[in-house]
Each structure stands twice: as structure tokens, then as C-alpha cells.
Amino acid sequence: MMKWISITITAILIVGALMFLINVEDKQRYRSSDNIREISAKVEEMSLDEKIGQLIVGGIDGTEINNETKDMIEHYHIGGVILFADNIESKTQTVNLMNDMKKVNENNPYPLLLGVDEEGGSVTRMPEEITSLPPSGSIGKEQDQELAFEVGTLLGKQMQGLGFNLDFAPVLDVNSNPDNPVIGDRSFGDNPDIVSDMGIQTMKGIQSEGIISVVKHFPGHGDTSEDSHLELPKVDKSLKELLEVELVPFEKAISNGADVVMTAHILLPQMDTTYPASMSENMITGLLRDDMGFNGVVISDDLTMGAITENFRIEEAAIQSVKAGSDMILIAHHPNAVTSVHEALKAAVENGDISEVNINESVERIIHLKRKYKLSNEETPQTYFQWINEKVQEILNKVS
């Protein structure tokens, strides 16, 4: 009997090891030199319109597919869509909307990124049938990495069940300013190490469910006293000061496999006197890419926020953001702005203001990401959420 148990355990360990190696190989395959060459060749075959489209994540109006949304997908070839509470009224409606957008995109070899801001707490877009998770601040107080990972997996399951493939979470901002009007308990806390530990585990939990996690808001929105939805915040800190607090979670997340980083609309005059981080070459190409070694996808925060619109034209901001090193730009509201930004970016490439080589590199990174997570235009089935809600409720009871 003991011999049989020993053989069984050995077999389980071998199978487990093989599955681990297959999983590692699968995750690494998209980085192989052959695959890189193949993607580069595909990008060369794309029209400029198609390339520019992949750089844009746009918001939509309404709870059903409409001609404006169809036009963004079919004519402007947008790389992704973001939904908000106004677009979500029930789980069935949300899944149907997702499937309708996938159907419109079915002739495009590059599936849509379908994203949402779902952090838990005050930033939730879940319909009434789905229980929202607690705010990150409650999770941070527990200082329990297993709990943070479970929160991430549940976020991933919620996203998966509704048809999303990307979550703009977790927040890696260190809430170091008690007067901050926009972060608060969206952050895991005021200690950069706790924010790192909890944030990375939440990120990994989301990723474990096959959902793309976007860490935000680089280089850190925690020490601001203005709300960037309304105006442009200023953080007058040196690089040395940023490295001691704000950048700690981002550095650790990058070394732990972050796929996408969202940049913040924050002016850091000691780093760039003219442009906020989301438009700054010093911050994106210099700090994030060159110094911190991030090779994934960089996406701007929403260009329709007051921090941008009160200081720049959206088209100007989009061009500068791409020139600075952004791979994707977020236009979360006013779908008509997608049209003007697409045309402005195309014109900027044609007149030489933006290098098409740089556009190609961004599109390659976007396609790498979509392939890594096996995005497709296949329909999402309706999902039974009761057991997920029960697990979420257990966490709510634990941290309340």
C-alpha cells in the first residue's frame, strides 16, 4: 500500500513538473525570435490606418452595439475598448455587448482588448448581480499576500465571466498624502513595501486567470493634492525622492512580470518642466523604459480628463504621448475624439513628426501582448456567478 502511494505521489509530482514546464514554455513562446520576426513581418503588411488604430483604446456610448461603435472597430481598427458603469446594466447585457463587439471585429486578425476599471471598493463597474470586492486599502491593512492573490484571482474570474480580457488594476500608488482627493483607499496603503507586496500578488492573481493586469498610475499618484480628472497635479520631487517611495512598487512589479503600465497625468517639474508623465519622453522612454527596463505595453491614462483637456488639445496630447514612448492612448469618453485623434496621429506619421518605426515597435508590443494572453474573437458564454459572489462575500466578511 505504501509503495502504491509513493508511486502515485511521484507520478503527481512528475505531471506537475511537466505542466509547469509546459506553462513556462507557453508563456515564453511569444517572446521567441521566430515569433518576433513573424510579428514584425505581419506589422509591415498592415496599413498605416490599421497600425494607428491598434494604438487607441476608446470608450463607447450606450449599453448596446451601435453604428458609432461599429465604425470605431471596423473603420478605425481600434486596438481596444473600455467600458464604464453607463455601459453596464446587467451581466447578460454586458456579455452580449462584448460578444457583439467581437463579432464586428471578427475579420480583424488582432482581437480587441476589452477593458474596465475594476478595482473593488469605490471604483467598481460591476452590475447588481455581481458582488464587488472591498477597496485595496482594506486588503493592505491585512498584510496577507495569500489574501491579495485571492482578491486578484476573483477579479480575474469576474472579468472572465463578463467577457473582459483586461482590468485596469491594481493601483500601485503609495497613499503618502492624507489630503489626496483621488487615491485614498484605492491604494493598498502608505508604505511602499506593503503596496508592493499586496499589489504584486493582486496583479499575479489577475494574470493567473488569463486576464491582462494594468498597473497604475506611473510614476505614482499618491502624493498629489489635486484630482487629475479635474486639473493637472504637480509633484515637485527629485528622482532620488521618487525612488525611495513612489517608484518602489513599479520597480518590483516590473521585475515580477507586469505586462502593462498606465502613466499618470502628473507634472513632475524636476523631471520635465513642460509635460506630465503621460506625455513626457523623460518619464516614459528615459525612466520607465531605459532606466527601469520595462519592455511591455505603456498606456496613457484617459486623455479626456481635465488634467489634459484644460491644458492641451486632445490631438496634441495624443501625438506628444506617442512621441514620448506610449504604445497606447486611452480615450475613455467622447467617442468622436477617437476619430480626430486617429486622423491626427496618421497625419503626424505622414509628415514625419512621428516615426513609423516607433509606431511599428508599439504595434509589435501590442500584438505580443494579445498573443500572450490568447485573445480571440470567440464568444463568451453566460457564466454562473453565485459561487464567485460567495467567495467575494467571504473576503468582505474577513476585512470588515
Image (tube, helix red, strand yellow):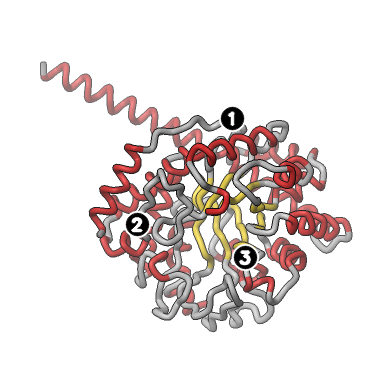
Q: Distance between the residues labelled 2 and 1?
A: 31 Å
The residue depicted at 53 percent of the width and 80 percent of the height is 235
**In the structure shown, which secondary structural element does the residue marked by tag 1 occupy?**
loop
- Left or right, 19 with respect to 296, comes to left
From the image, tell me which residue sits under label 1.
378
Q: Is residue 242 above or below residue 81?
A: below
Query: Residue tagged by mark 2?
Result: 134
Q: Which amino acid does label 3 sit on?
A: Ile
Residue linked to disc 3? 284
Q: Can you say which quadrant of the picture contains the N terminus?
A: top left
Above-or-below relation of 237 to 114: below
Please state if 352 lies on the left or on the right of 339 as rendered.
right
Q: Can residue 28 be seen in this view?
A: no
**Which numbered disc, 2 or 3, marks the residue that appears first in the sequence?**
2
* Disc 2 packing (10 Å; few <14; some 14–19; many ≥20): many
Callout 3 secondary element:
helix
Residue 232 appears at what percent x and percent y?
60, 77
Q: x, y (%) of residue 348?
A: 83, 60
287 and 197: which is toward the camera: 197
Q: Which of marks 1 and 3 is nearer the N terminus?
A: 3
Give me the residue at 38% from left, 44% from top.
153
Q: What element carries label 2?
A: loop
